[in-house]
Amino acid sequence: MDRRILVAVFIAGIFCIASFSGCVSQPSQPDKIEGMSAKEALDKSFAASAATGSYSYKMTMRASLPNDVSAGVAMDVMSVYGIVDKVNKKMYLSTVMNQLQSANNTETYIIGSTYYGRNASGEWVKQESTNDKLWQQSSIQGMQGELANYSAVSFLSEEKVDGVSCYVINITPDKDKLPSLLGKNANLPEQTLSNIVSASIKEWVAKDSFLMKRMSFQIDMEDSGKIIRMETEIVFSDYGKEQSIDLPEGAKNAKALE
C-alpha cells in the first residue's frame, strides 16, 4: 500500500471516533458552551475515550485531486471494520481495499501480545510481540493532547447524532508543528511528513458522556506538484459492551514468524 495512504490511516486512527445521522443546527461558533471551552470539551472526550473498555468502529477513506482540471472523480481507497476489547486485550481488524487493490484485503487478530494475520493467499501467520504499548492507551492519548495544544480548537455548533446531542468541535493543527509531532510519535519518514500541506478535523462529542460520536478528517498532501486529498470518516459504536473476538480455526494453526 502507498505510504501516503498509510500516513492518512494512522492519522485517522489517532483522532478516531464517529457515527453520523440526525439533525443539524445552525453554526453559532461560540467561545464557550455552558461555561466550557472547546478545548476543555476536547480534553474530556480524550479522557472518556481512553477510559472505555471496548468499542467497535467502521472507517471509510476516499482520495481525490481537488485542484486538478480532471478532478471530479474521487476514489474509494478502503473500508475498515474493527473491534477493540481493551479489558481482555483482544482486537479484530478487517481491511477491504478498492477493486484495484483487492488483493491486499487483510484480516488481523491481536490476542494479548500475539498478532495473527491472514495474507492475500489465505495463509495465516502469527508473531509474538514483547511490546505491550498497544494496550497502554496513555501514549496515544498523550499524543492527542499534545497535538491539540498546537491546534486551533473551536466550537462549530451543536448537532444530534443517532439521537444523541453532540458538540461539534473543529480542530486545525499548526502546519509547522504537525510533521514533528507525527514524526516523533509514529516514526514516519521525514519526506512523507514534509508533503503534508494542511489538515483539519471535525469531531462530534456526546454532551452527556463526552464520547466522540463521529470524526471526519481531511489531509492534503503534495505529490509531484499535485495536491492529493485524503478524506476519512470513522464511526464508533458499542462503547463498553461485551465484544466477541474469537480466532477462526485457520488462525489457530497459523505459521509462526520469527
Image (tube, rainbow, N blue to C red):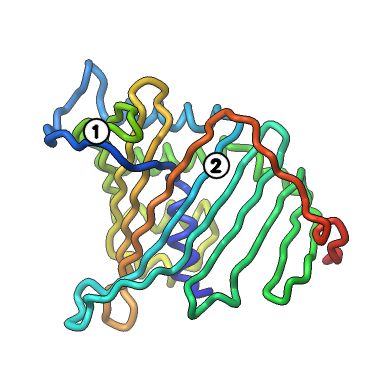
Decide if residue 167 is on the left or right side of residue 8: left
In this rendered view, identify the residue nearer to me: 45 or 238: 238
- The quarter of the image holding the C terminus is bottom right
Q: Earlier in the sequence, mark 1 or mark 2?
A: 2
Could you say where residue 246 lies in the image, as x and y percent from the top left?
A: 75, 46
Q: Position of residue 159 (x, y in %)?
A: 24, 33
Quick one: label 2, few (<14), some, or many (20+) residues within 10 Å? many
Measured in 3D between alpha carbons, the distance from the residue under mark 1 to the one under mark 2, in whole angstroms, is 22 Å
Residue type at mark 2?
Ser
Q: Is residue 228 above or below residue 82?
A: below
Q: Which residue is mark 1?
A: 159
Residue in view at x 40 percent, y 42 percent: 18
Percent x, y of residue 109: 70, 53
Q: Position of residue 32 (x, y in %)?
A: 19, 23
Q: Nearer the viewer, residue 156 or 136?
A: 156
Task: Determine whether the residue tagged by mark 2 lies in a helix, strand or loop.
Answer: strand
In the figure, 45 relative to 11: above or below? above
Binning the other alpha carbons within 10 Å of mark 1 as few (below 14), some (14 to 19) or many (20 upward) gives many
Q: Name the residue tied to disc 2.
A: 56
For image coordinates 21% across by 33% down, the residue present is 155
The residue lying toward the viewer, choosing from 30 and 241, is 241
Q: Amino acid at mark 1?
A: Glu
Circle 1 SS class: strand
* Residue drawn at the location 36% of the way across and 72% of the way down: 75
* Mark number, residue 109: none
Q: Residue furthest top?
A: 35
Examine the rendered structure and indicate whether residue 17 appears above or below residue 233: above
In screen coordinates, is 124 left or right of 15?
Answer: right
* Residue 209 in which image quadrant: top left
